[in-house]
Amino acid sequence: MSDVNKTVQKWHASFRKGTDFDSWGQLVEAIDEYQILARQLQKEGQSTNSSDFTEEQKKTLGKIATCLEMRSASLQCAQSKEEFKLEDLKKLETIIKNILTYNKEFPFDVQPVPLRKILAPGEEENLELEEEDAAAGPGSTEAFPPRAPGTLLPRLPSEPGMTLLTIKIEKIGLKDAGQCIDPYMTISVKDVNGVDVNPVQDTPVASRKEDTYIHFSVDVEIQRHVEKLPKGAAIFFEFKHYKPKKRFTSTKCFAFMEMDEIKPGPIVIELYKKPTDFKRKKLQLLTKKPLYLHLHQTLHKDS
């Protein structure tokens, strides 16, 4: 079997896995599977050097990715106006399975997510050569333009004697807050070796900006009971924004919270220079100015 056929088979298996979880009501797992597959399809759809797929096929892959993201958004928000149903998503199974021969019209009026280069962590630093965003003009609008919804996950079911953590990301202080386009946060929980413990989550684009602050006011549900987090783990917050000249999303800075900092109430944490150091070995403060990430923690204990 050729490599391209293996890839298509892998995508089809992932699609089936996601829709199975979805139909069983395992929403956290379904969202996770949909997000991973959407990212893979977007990456292939945006590839400029792959000859395995025609331009038309890449466009179709991008449209499938959009539908996967729409279904994820529907699962995350019960009040979603743009509800994308499971039975609609299932109509795409034959398309993804037969992508190499599919030549009919796409069943839904959607478009691939606009071309934004998807980079592995650390990759954007090589491209940027630590270039500053000085060329960008000051922001003029109070609210940010709409972007695809984030990938925030619902709270886990409670368990007797176990504690769940909700972190509200209130705001981040940056000297050039007004210049950031489509700013959002990526939240991950890493063990002491920098390996993911939970699914990675993205917030939607920030709600507004004000002077040197970008406001998020969004709740993030940590996807593991506090008692089950490994010793030495940390919760990372990566601040990302879009660079139109380079057409990719870049990490600007990051912050993290260690296990002994998990306690109810407000917390203010320092910002560090990129690249994100998940092992916390070589940390450099972003600025000497008093600019921080402002959070508020809520602990839910089921007695």
Image (tube, rainbow, N blue to C red):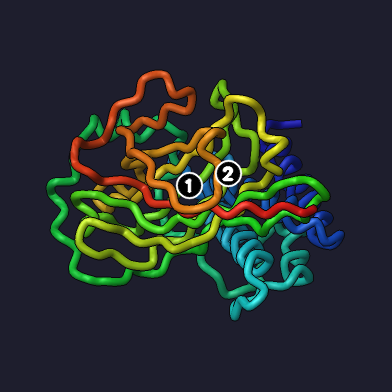
Q: Which residue is drawn at 80% across and 49% down?
A: 17
Whole-Å distance between the Cαs marked 1 and 2?
A: 7 Å
Looking at the image, can residue 239 be seen? yes
Q: Do the residues under discs 1 and 2 have CB atoms within 8 angstroms? A: yes
Q: Residue at x 19, y 49 (%)?
A: 175
Label 1 environment density (alpha carbons within 10 Å; few <14, some 14–19, many ≥20): some
Viewer-proximal residue, 294 or 80? 294
Residue type at tag 1: Thr
Label count reads: 2
Label 2 sits on a secondary structure element that is loop
Q: Residue at x 78, y 71 (%)?
A: 87
Relative image position of residue 284 (x, y in whole percent): 29, 27
Q: In this view, does 204 lie to the left or right of 18?
A: left
Q: Is residue 79 left or right of residue 282?
A: right
Q: Which residue is disc 2 drawn over?
A: 200
Residue type at tag 2: Val
Q: Residue furthest right?
A: 24
Looking at the image, can residue 98 be seen? no
Q: Which residue lies furthest to the bottom in this view?
A: 81
Relative image position of residue 296 (x, y in whole percent): 48, 54
Label 1 sits on a secondary structure element that is strand
Q: Which residue is drawn at 77% across and 54% down?
A: 302
Q: Which residue is disc 1 drawn over?
A: 186
Viewer-proximal residue, 139 or 9? 139
Label 2 environment density (alpha carbons within 10 Å; few <14, some 14–19, many ≥20): some
Viewer-proximal residue, 41 or 50? 41
